[in-house]
Amino acid sequence: MNERQPSTALARALRLTEHFSTGVVLAVPVAVLGLLKRPRPWLPGLVAWWHRRLLRSLAVGVEATGTPVQGALLVVNHVSWLDIPVLGSLAPVRFVSKLEVRRWPVVGWLADLAGTLFMQRGAHQATAMARVIAAELQAGATVAIFPEGTTGDGRELKRFHARLLAAADGGQVPIQPVAIRYGNGVEPDAIAPFIGDDSLLPHLGRVLRHPELCVRVSFLPQLDPAGLTRRALAEAAREAIDRQLRDWSNAACGSSAATPDAHAAARTF
């Protein structure tokens, strides 16, 4: 981290409250300009700044390797709601999220203003969302999807659903797997996963009390879609992410663990 992190849960909670208050103040002109259809070329930078500041408020350390590909469809394993600020702090990314997040107090409104694409559950909704994602990709945006469809505990990957990969049909869109792992030991962190019957506020309280939460992110090499079906691409992305997670399994956060993108230097904040 570039700034000293708050060391107690109370200090973190106070800083988090200030951060969300700042977000609401900044969101008002963003919303007004959006309603007036005015251009907001500075919005992606503002969103990335907001994500970085959120992570500092929570005392979350991020180590990233590899290079995010501009205009790519990012295929990411899903562990927690923290995945979004973690990735959003590293690159301008549009996220696909479940519609329930839009109803979260304050958070849902801010996510909407930041450009999150909200999707209802169901195969037919996925088909419609794939068309929306394709339009965003064709316009040059980078879009992240979580093909597991739900969060996991960080130990084992779930099946990757292939429907949203229809957004990259035709082989013209780069497809980049991205691996995320929480924790600095052999076992993944037990607090970070947002699973089962978890609700946001109790989970946030556990994160605030966490003594040191570390996240590792690896932007992996692009997939070659030539001759591959959506299902084959989903499996290829899953295998690439699984290999990286296994490579990390015995490496402490902050170490010089290997990454498939050998030329990329680790970025820590």
Image (tube, rainbow, N blue to C red):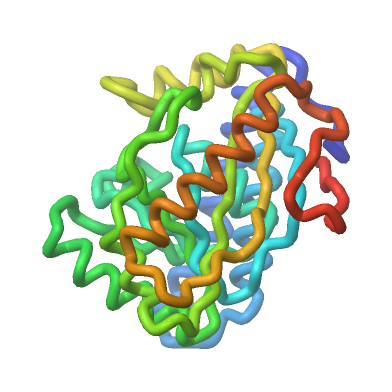
Residue 33: x and y, percent? 48, 78
Q: Quadrant of the N terminus?
A: top right
Considering every residue shown, the one lying at the far front of the view is 227
Residue drawn at (58%, 44%) of the image: 179
Q: Viewer-proximal residue, 137 or 14?
A: 137
57 or 31: nearer the viewer:
57
- Using the image, determine if residue 246 lies above or below residue 129: above
Which quarter shows the C terminus? top right
Image position of 108 (left or right of 90): left
> In the displayed structure, would residue 173 be above or below residue 10?
below
Q: Residue 81 vs residue 105: left or right? A: right
- Nearest the viewer among 100 and 218 is 218
Q: Could you tell me which residue is drawn at 57 percent across and 33 percent down?
A: 17
Residue at image position (50%, 17%) is 205
Q: Is there any visible trace of residue 28 in the rendered image? A: no
> Can you give x and y, in whole percent of width and height, for residue 68 in the image?
67, 62
On the image, the x and y values in percent for residue 7 come to 76, 16
In the rendered view, would you say 95 is above or below 169? above
Residue 214 visible in the displayed image: yes
* Residue drawn at 42 percent across, 56 percent down: 145
Relative image position of residue 77 (x, y in whole percent): 47, 43
Name the quadrant containing residue 233.
bottom left
Q: How many marks?
A: 0
Q: Determine the image quadrant of residue 241.
A: top right
